[in-house]
Each structure stands twice: as C-alpha cells, then as structure tokens.
Image (cartoon, rainbow, N blue to C red):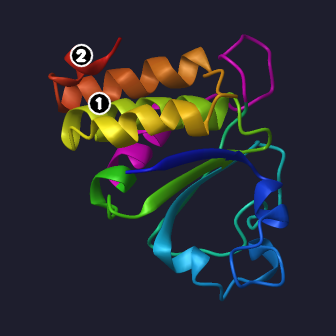
Amino acid sequence: MIIHVVPEKWYKEFIPAGGHLPVYQCPDSPFWQINNFINIRNSRSIDPNRGVPLDGENILKLQFDDVRELPGVRRRPFDRNMAEKIIDFVTRCDHTRELYVNCSAGISRSGAVGYILNLYVNKLLENDPQDFELFSRLNPQVDANPLVKEILISVITERNPKFAEAIP
C-alpha cells in the first residue's frame, strides 16, 4: 500500500490531473473514492471537515494532540482506543488503494501513524519491499511522535506477535 503523510493544507492545494480546483473544494472528486484517508485533528478543532471535507467507509477521523500525557496539561494525547481504531481501519481497507494520513503539519502525529502502518502493512502483512521503501522517499519530513509509535506498536504486537520482528 502506498502511504502518503501530508499536512491538512495539502488537500486545499492539490489539483488532480484533469482537475481545475483543489480536491478539498470538490467532495465529489474521484480522488475521495479511490483512496483511503486517516484524518487527525487537534483536540481544539471544532470543524469535523477540517482537512478531509467528507465522511465515508474509506475515511477515519480522529482527534488528539501532539503531546505525551502530562499531569495538568489540558490536551488530549493519543490512546489505545485510537490505536485500535487505526488498526481496525487499515485491516479492513483496500490495500490496493493509496492511504493518505494527515495532521496539521504532516510530520509528527500523522508521521508516526504512517511510519508504523508502513511497517505493519508493507513489511509484515503484504511483504511489499517496493511500497515499503517508497514510504521513506515520499515522506522524508516524518519525525514520528514517540507516544503514538509506542501505543501503535503495543496494540499491533498484541494482535500479531510477529510484528515485533518487523520493527527496526
């Protein structure tokens, strides 16, 4: 599965071949039907369509902040429930479709999700060295959030102990 890690503004700038407007302005664009999406918004975001302007079976929307759980901090950290939603989503989605994972900057939260899903799907489930290597070339900006990585690794390893062998 080809995995793209992008900032939320990317959808407002990307114009597909043959298109005239950015995909964000065209919720009926085939782009939204032929790909999978994980949309990550921060806990203060009240717009459910921020980043991805529609809902569907191929779209997972989550809200959490780019932090570790700290006493007294009024932010929402990534948790086990969110990790399970991500793994359930990627397990049932069509792996022949590309996956777009976004957060506000397309670096830390979405980077961690994309990085771990690349290991899980492309290295373990599909054993696809071409898509596995492509991830690094497509997403050089990734600086994965350690809490997100840690929880995703824990949940996936509990479900599939062989995942531990895929982790560098």
Measured from the top left, where is residue 164 in percent x and y?
Answer: 24, 16
The label shown at residue 156 is 1
Measured from the top left, where is residue 81 in percent x and y?
Answer: 44, 39
Measured from the top left, where is residue 8 in percent x and y?
Answer: 77, 52
Spatial CA distance of label 1 from label 2 is 9 Å
* Quarter placement of the C terminus: top left
Instruction: Give the left or right position of residue 85, taking residue 96 as reference.
Output: right
Residue 67 falls within the magenta-colored stretch: yes
| Residue 47 in view in this figure | no
Crowd rating for badge 2 (residues with CA inside 10 Å; few <14, some 14–19, many 20+): some
Q: Main secondary structure of the magenta part?
A: loop
Q: Mark 2 highlights which residue?
A: 164
Amino acid tagged 2: Ala
Where are the magenta residues, as a range? 66-88
Q: Which badge, 1 or 2, is on the more N-terminal residue?
A: 1
Crowd rating for badge 1 (residues with CA inside 10 Å; few <14, some 14–19, many 20+): some
